[in-house]
Amino acid sequence: MLTATLAETSAALHAGRISSVELTRGVLDRIAEHDPALNAFVTVDEEGALAAARAADAALAQRTAGALTGVPIAHKDVLMTAGLRTTCGSRMLARFTAPYDAHVVAGLKAAGTVLVGKTNMDEFAMGSSNETSWFGPARNPWQRDHVPGGSSGGSAAAVAARLVPGATGTDTGGSIRQPAAFTGVCGVKPTYGICSRYGLVAYASSLDQAGPFARTAEDCALLLNAMAGHDPRDSTSIERPVEDYTRDLARPLAGLRIGLPAEYFGAGVEAEVGAAIEAALAVLRRLGATTVDVALPNARLAVPVYYVLAPAEASSNLSRFDGVRYGHRAERYADLADMYRKTRSEGFGDEVKRRILIGTYVLSHGYYDAYYLKAQRARRLIAEDFRRAYAACDLIVGPTAPTAAFRIGAKSDDPVEMYLGDIFTVAANLAGAPAMSIPCGFTGAGLPIGLQLQGDYFSEARLLNVAHQFQQATDWHLRAPAPFA
Amino acid sequence: MKWEVVIGIETHAQLSTASKIFSGASTAFGAAPNTQAAAVDIALPGVLPVANRGAVERAIRFGLAVGATINRRSVFARKNYFYPDLPKGYQISQYEIPVVQGGALVIATPRGEKTIRLTRAHLEEDAGKSLHEDFHGMSGIDLNRAGTPLLEIVTEPDLRSSEDAVAYAKALHALVQWIGICDGNMQEGSFRCDANVSVRPLGETQLGTRCEIKNLNSFRFMQAAVDFEVQRQIALIEDGGAVVQETRLFDPDRNETRSMRGKEDAQDYRYFPDPDLPPLVVDDGWIERVRATLPELPRAMQQRFVTQYALPEADALALTASRGLAAYFEDVARGVNGDAAGAKLAANWIQGELAAALNRAEIGIERVPLPAAKLAALLTRIQDQTISGKIAKEVFDAAWAGEHGSDADAIIAARGLRQISDEGAIERIVDEVLAANAATVAEFRAGKEKAFNALVGQAMKATKGKANPTQVNAILRRRLER
């Protein structure tokens, strides 16, 4: 039962086969047993989880429970959780207790979920390996000397290791999809504006978007139902009717037009990854989909554009961490400038500092036009590519990442090499469009491979439908890493 | 050499919204430190700004009042710098595309009217306050003011003297209150000006190097600061030196400006569009709804006063110093009687006795204890000759003090101030005065015209000022010329 999917767990709770308190105790025990090997959690809230579980059991008894009532989940530690430590994986906030709930946290709380803890992440969501966390790297449950991906590495690892049936993440340039691919789980990055960013500690505001992790598309849909929705506290939150993201799950794929951009199948994609994607496409064709070649001529610009715009916004967003009002402050300093210098030098790790420096540079007088403005123009071209492509297809399919998970430390000395791993994921953020990753195979070494589905704005239900149908025909998502099965 | 002074002014007007520009916290002045700072104002991690429609609406009001262009789409930008009272490490402002562009303000100067062009007016948030006293070598931070909505109003370099600068600042100060977007309280910092000052040889078309004088929070300081700065720059150039572009601070104790930071210390603010706030969109419907609520503007009202009441321009200008004053005047003028004489009488009394009384009581027209209708009733008694202008001042003082419910007729009756207009009675008094002042009469007859006034004075004195002075004059003249 403890390793069941979210939908199975929900059914068991509603049928009374297990109580939320029993389930939660079991989950807490599993975390205590396995997390030391994974470092997926930064904080475990036993007391809060059991209190929430008791409330959930009461709701279940009174038949006022919903699909998520009593289901244990974890939140990425970049989402504010009232009364609970929220660190962003940084020394800067290592002892910071959030005074309020993020919108998506409140949504999942209202839906009756049981929050068991906060998951590890790259510092301030900056990284693709979870190695930049102040709390040490989270590990890939499939091979513990490999990274789980990042920045939402802890959530992905926790779901892959069956420590929780679902978790939240945030995705600024692939931070949900790439770790989902690396750990063999599903992860959804919704259309920008679907999930309110209120309470999501900003990395790059125009790109950040929260989304769910789970083992199945159906579970992701259930979680997204509780996370989405307009929030007047976020001016970029979109006002549109509430959707049921499970509504299209059963829809047959006949007539589905899948776009295949040559740019996603060229050099740089590992052969094993390419083969797994081809095999997945064969499954989708068998299910009734047709494929069509589409062009994303500006795809090659996505990584450089992303690594101008995201650091630019980050350099400004992270200015509030100045040691004045909360968070880390250097112990000894001579004056105000010294206090800032020491506080931020001590509080931030290297990758965060690197991006603050890059961002400060590209916004500086004399460089703004050449970098920031140019990148904004290129961003529009990238979005335009998608718009044209979606005239000919319903969604775009390709690898989530060019490789499977890599060894811890393998890329830590080469940031550019690390950044290039984001090549297939950043474009969706730049365009603001939805995308998800589902497991579609393994490498010879036994590491998961992820299939990325991208769609036009607000096509989440369609993406989830395709993913669900794929999962009805395959069992990649059911495979569990041996030590955690 | 003849020098020309060139001044441009930037004003920060605090907009009179109940809540802050990007959060729901109150903007009320004077609360205990940090009690009016919401999560957004203290920049907790994860919080987001939401623009206050009331602040935008006030910016639109201003734009319409100065005939500016309201940009249908303007952009909030981040101005990045570190300071402890700037919680986010950036100020949300508008940079490349402000909500209000262009427009002009007409000001009255001793050399006549002048049109001052406005460059722009943009919305931004205020910072908090650093408190450097009372913390034993440390600084305190009060974030109550952080996030208070400001409209920064920028002129073209169209002002040519400290008098121009002050006239502009006063006109702007009056206007923002007139249209109800700012309380104008300069002590509390609701209206603060920076002056950009430069000088150039008369006839030169290139601008000289300017210095910016920060935070002029009174008109007197503005005048003194600009005067000092102009003299400093002229002296510097005449001595063979050159003005260095810098920011200066006015020290009111020493009546001088002092360098605060030079151009080389100018920070690179790294402005960029705030990704948390979509472009501010103002549609025609919104603009028209705001236009419909705009009051008659001071200039239009001045012109109407001149035509409708036949008032001199100076009176029209003075009476439109504030909406409250203008409304009071119109109420009094209507109450006296609609004609030009009545309006002029009202104008004179409001600018004379009433202004003096308000001054003495240190209150503004909005707290005047004498209702316009009561003053009108009093002035009516001057018009119908029930009392003289001189006696009217006594009645005014009593009415101001609330005597007899400020009712002029009751005061006149109770104090026996009704004017003596009975021909026979005045003749009797005049005869008595003539009999008692034979020497003065003799002087008059010897050609000393002044003696006549002395005799009038005696007659008025004998009636405690109540005799109709016109009649006294006429009767006395008749008697003496007999």
Image: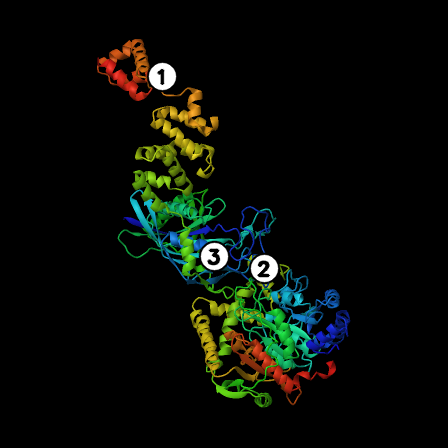
Q: Distance from label 2 to label 3 (Cα)?
A: 28 Å
Closest to the observer, B10 or A23:
A23
- Report in which chain the residue with disc 1 lies: B
Mark in front: 1 vs 2: 1
Residue B215 in sight in this render: no
Q: x, y percentage for residue A189?
A: 58, 75
**Type of amino acid at the residue the image marks with label 3:** Glu
Residue B437 placed where, x, y %?
A: 30, 10
Position of residue A179 in the picture relative to residue A364 (left or right): right
How far separated are the C-alphas under marks 1 and 2?
Answer: 80 Å
Please name the amino acid that badge 2 sits on: Met
Q: Which residue is mark 2?
A: A339
Q: Which residue is mark 3?
A: B124
Q: Secondary structure at mark 1?
A: helix
Mark 1 or 3, nearer chain start:
3
Q: CA distance from mark 1 to mark 3?
A: 65 Å
